[in-house]
Amino acid sequence: MTVPTYFQSNTIYCGDCRDVLRKFPDEYVDLIYADPPFFSNKQYEVIWHDGYEIRAFEDRWKGGVQHYVLWMRERIEQCYRVLKKTGLFYLHCDYHAGHYLKVICDRIFGYENFRNEIVWCYSGGGIPKKDFPRKHDTIFRYSKSNKYVYNPEYRAYTAGTLERGRTKVKGKYAKLRKQGTPVTDWWTDVKYIHSPTDKEKLGYPTQKSEALLERIIKTSSNSFDLVLDPFCGCGTAIAVAHKLGRKWIGIDVSPTACNLMGKRMKSIGAKPVLVGMPMTEKELRSLPPFEFQNWVVKRMFGRVSKRKTSDMGIDGYTLEGYPIQVKQSDHIGRNVVDNFETAMRRVNKKRGAIVAFSFGKGAYEEIARAKLNGGLEIIAITVKELIENKNRNVQRKL
């Protein structure tokens, strides 16, 4: 099969996995690990490991669980279509909606192709007062046929088993396996990332450990197989796939996440290709606010402001330390410039930049007044200038 360039492996695609996968050919990938939003009804703000890369997202669904299930069904259907007949599909979920997703997967893959309900147990975290502590995730494992890869993994026997052997139960001819006992569907020995100082932690609140993905990829694929993660997040699945000698494809709707995945993959010797990154005014207008701020600041070779909630009127800083304010709107007026002047004085800066799609006459008049009367130099930069790589002139002005 000749595959178009768009579908090459070792690529990170920016976009909704439903829309991206619709462009893929049928029966193309060998293994899919899907770790979608969990329907947790939480607001997440991701502060990446360097403390400056920020991405905010909601795991909330206005239409309730039925809306969530319909949203997931469309994406699971695409996963099923691109999965080879010999492939395997893993769906990682928890108690919020796992039972609903199991029914959807049974309908799409066929009840007879349900292989395992893996229970990943862990400890740590808070202890509720009125409930048993919730300390496990569920991972559903499906095939498309009776022919699929399974490389069993083994763990060491317990001291008691080694002492008594198997003969008392299995008979005098039974012997212990040299490699140990097969790993079951109850995983208590796989690392869970708890500590904020964990060397693996990248600042992503739902990040999974490399040990978890290593077990899934080793047992369910072979060297040079193609691994797909349609909700790639911080890129753990594709990073582990690369280390294990597999080909890989990652998809995420967040441009910030895709950029950081690219950096992560380069750090382990991969040469990722990024496809679908927003580069038109229309695409940039549709980004969530934090994503748009990140795009602007990075386009200016700056750093996003280090904060969790309020930015105090400053969204980032240039490499020289000058403040940047980002507005995802048109016809910026006098009041925006006036407020930015206050923010600049608060951080004791004489120079700064405001980025927006366009500026009104009042904004330019206030910029001139601020320089004449207040000694503040404010540069008005349009998104079009950044798209056209005119930011070098901006850097000289700053």
Image (cartoon, rainbow, N blue to C red):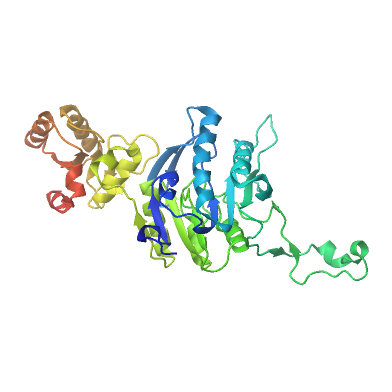
Q: Is residue 196 visible?
A: no
Q: Residue at x 44, y 46 (%)?
A: 17
Q: Quadrant of residue 138?
A: top right
The image quadrant where one finds the N terminus is bottom left
Q: Determine whether 31 is above or below 334 in the image.
A: below
Estimate the x, y position of residue 55 in percent, counting from the top left: 39, 43
Estimate the x, y position of residue 40 in percent, counting from the top left: 54, 35
Q: Determine whether 226 is above or below 98 in the image.
A: below
In the image as oriented, which residue stretches furthest toward the front? 1
Q: Quadrant of residue 373?
A: top left
In the image as oriented, which residue stretches furthest toward the left? 372
Is 184 situated left or right of 44 in this image?
right
Q: Residue at x 63, y 51 (%)?
A: 141
Q: Is residue 219 visible?
A: yes
Closest to the observer, 101 or 328: 101
Closest to the observer, 341 or 354: 354
